[in-house]
Image (cartoon, grey):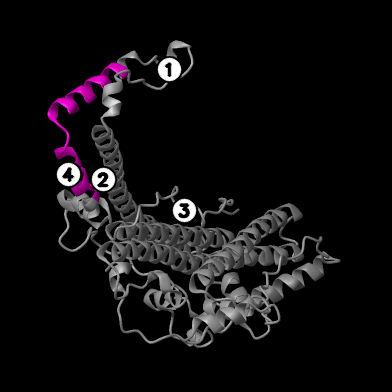
Amino acid sequence: MPFYRRLTASLALLTLSAAHGADALPNALRAADPDQASVAPAWPLPAMGSAAPLELPASIDEARAIWQRANQRVAEFPRGHVDLLRWEARQPGAEGATPATSAQEPMALAQALHLSLRARPDLFVHAGMNALEQADVRVRFATHVRELQHAWIDAVAARQHARLMQEVFDTARTGSELGQRMVNAGNWSQARLTRERLLQASAWSAAVEAQAMEHGAREHLARRLGFWRAEDLARLGERLPASLPALPERLSPGSGLEDATLEAAVLRSHPTLADDRTKLQRQAEAVNPQGWQAWNEAVDRALVAMPAPASGGPLEPPRIEDLSLLRDHTLARTAQAGSGLLLQVVERRSMTREAWASLQVRHASALHAQDVVLELQGALAQETLLRYNGMLQSTWELLASARDRLRALDQALQARRDFWRAEADWQALLAGADYRRADAPSTAGATTAAPAGH
C-alpha cells in the first residue's frame, strides 16, 4: 500500500515529541536561545589499519611454528580462517565488535508526519476558509508530505547502506588480517599483502563516505521534523527502521485509476485549473468568431514572416502588424488567458505521463535487482562456499564472493529507495502538487569494483 495512503489519524506520539512540548512557540524560543546547550554526538570512524611493513619471522623454524599455531586454531571452525576472524571480532572489547542494537519501536512514516506538522500551522485547514484557500493548503500539504517522505526514505536507506558498507569493510579487513598471518608464516609476499591492504583502504573510504551520507540524511530528516537538539538527532538514528518497506508485487496507480483516467485525475487535483477553465469559457463567449479567425490569421502571418534562426541574422520575435486586433482588449485578454491555461494543461498532462512512466521503470528495476540480480549473486556465493569447503577455491575467493554479494544487496537497496521516492512523487502529483522531476537513478550505494581475489 502506498505511503501516502497509510497515514492514519490515530497514532501514538513518539517519546521524541515530548522534548518539543505541546506549545510550539516556547519551543521556538528555547531553540533560538544561544545559551541552550546542544552538544553534537561523536561519530566514530572505523579503524583504518596499518600500512607499516610487518616484522617477519627471524628463521624458518619460527615461521613454521607460527603457521602451525594458526592452523590449530583454524581447525576449530567449520569454514576455517573466515569463521576464526569473525569469532575474534565478536569477543568483548575486540575491534569491530557488533554494538548492541536498540529495542525501541521504529519510527513509522506517519509518526514522522505528525511530528513535522507540529511546527507547520500553515498546513492545517480551518473553519472560515473558502474552497480555493482549502485547495491551496491541500497542495502545500501534499508537497510537504512528499518532501518528508523523501527525507525519511533517504535516512532509512542511508542507514542500511552504511551498515552494508561497514560489512564490506569488515570483509576486506578479514582478508588483510589473513594476509598478514600468511606473511608472518612465510607463505605470502609483501606484494600480495599490499593488494589486500589496498582493498581494505578502498573499503574504508566507502564505509566512511556511507557514514557521512547517513549523517547528512539524518540531519535532513531532523530539519523536516523540527528537531534542533543534537541529542534528538542521536535518538532519531536509534528510532529509524532497519530497512525500507518491501516492494509491492504489482504496481497500481491508485484506487479506481487506470491508464486512460490518469491525466484526468491529475487535472482535477489542481487547485485552480477548473476555475481557470470556467473563466476562459466565459471570456471566449464574449469574442465573436470573426475576431478569433482574424487573430489566428495574424499569428500565422507573423510566424511565416519571422526570420529563421539559421539564417545568420539576429533573432527576432514574431510581429503582429494589425493594431485593430491589439486594441480589442477582450480578444487580447482571452488569447492571453487561453495561452496560460494551455501551458498549465500541457505541463500537468506531461507530468502525469512522466511520473507514471518513471514509477513503472523504478518498480521494474527494483524487482529485477531483488529477484534476479540478488538471487543470481546469492547462488554464486553459495556455489563459491561449496567449492571452498571442497578445497577447490581459496579463502580470498570466498571473501571476494562475500563482497560481491554485499554490493548486490546495496544495489537492490538503492533501487528500492528510488522506487519509494518515485511513489512519493506520484502520490503528491495525484494530490495536486507539481511533479518534481527525478534525478538519474541513485548511485549512492555504488562502490568501485575491487579485484575479485587471488
- Check disc 1 and report the residue beneath it: 309
Identify residue for label 2. Answer: 349
Q: Amino acid at mark 1?
A: Pro
Q: Looking at the image, can residue 76 be seen? A: no
| x and y percentages locating residue 407 in the rendered image | 49, 58
Say which quarter of the image contains residue 2: bottom left
Q: Are marks 4 and 2 in contact (CB under 8 Å)?
A: no
Mark sitting on residue 9: none
Is residue 59 toward the left or the right of residue 104 in the image? Answer: right
* Between marks 4 and 2 in the image, the one whose residue lies nearer the viewer: 4
Vertical position of residue 393 compared to residue 348: above or below: below
Q: Residue at x 60, y 70 (%)?
A: 81
- The reply, left or right, for residue 268 in relation to residue 58 is left
Q: Earlier in the sequence, mark 3 or mark 4?
A: 4
Give the number of the disc on residue 282: 4
Q: In the rendering, at what x and y percent does residue 239 appear? A: 49, 80
- Which of the two discs, 3 and 4, sits closer to the camera? 4
Amino acid tagged 2: Arg
- The boundaries of the magenta stretch are 276-302
Q: Is residue 405 left or right of residue 167?
A: left
Compared to residue 262, the image places residue 345 above or below, namely: above
Position of residue 326 relative to residue 406, above or below, is above
Residue 289 lies in the magenta stretch: yes
Disc 2, SS:
helix
Give the residue type that dot 3 points to: Ser
| Numbered mark located on residue 442 in the image | 3
From mark 3 to mark 2, how far is it between C-alphas? 26 Å
* Residue type of the residue flagged with mark 4: Arg
